[in-house]
Image (cartoon, rainbow, N blue to C red):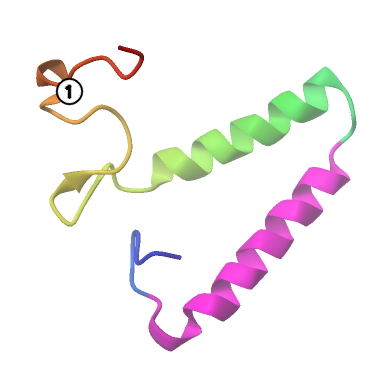
Amino acid sequence: MDAYPVDYGANAETIAICKIRDAARDWLGIPRTVEGVEHYLQQWDAKLEALPAIYGGRTVRGKPEHATDLPPTNA
């Protein structure tokens, strides 16, 4: 809960605890099959895609516009 995509103010810690608990419950509740894990991952992909790609003027999801200027991370 680092103020992305919104600043939750004084409630940030409470909301973070709830989000972590909900994510753990979702993970523990999935069927332990390939389909179950794929469904879980698709849900998280959809949640991430729903967030803005740029926050506070910086890229937080996807490649930054200047990514071609950066050296490879495995160099």
Q: What crowding class fits label 1: few (fewer than 14 Cα within 10 Å), some (14-19), or many (20 or more)? A: few
Which image quarter is the C terminus in? top left
Residue under pointer 1: 67
**Location of residue 42 (image quadrant):** top right
Q: Amino acid at mark 1?
A: Ala
Residue 21 or 44: which is nearer the viewer?
21
Residue at the front extreme of this rendering: 75
Per the image, is 70 magenta? no
**Location of residue 65 (image quadrant):** top left
Where residue 10 appears, as percent x and y from the top left, is: 44, 87
Q: Residue at x 26, y 14 (%)?
A: 72
**Location of residue 56 (image quadrant):** bottom left
Q: Please tell me whether residue 23 is drawn above or below residue 36 in the rendered image.
A: below
Where residue 68 appears, as percent x and y from the top left, is: 13, 16
Main SS of the magenta segment? helix
Which type of secondary structure does the marked residue at label 1 adopt? helix
Q: Residue at x 84, y 39 (%)?
A: 30
Q: Residue at x 64, y 31 (%)?
A: 41
Q: Please tell me whether residue 26 is drawn above or below residue 30 in the rendered image.
A: below
Where residue 46 appears, as percent x and y from the top left, is: 51, 38
Where residue 58 appears, as percent x and y from the top left, is: 18, 46
Q: Is residue 19 left or right of residue 45?
A: right
Residue 1 or 70: which is nearer the viewer?
70
Q: Is residue 75 left or right of residue 39?
A: left
Q: Is residue 2 left or right of residue 33?
A: left
Residue 44 or 57: which is nearer the viewer?
57
Q: Is residue 53 left or right of residue 15?
A: left
Per the image, is 14 magenta? yes
Write the start and end of the magenta stretch as one range: 8-30
Q: Residue at x 34, y 73 (%)?
A: 7
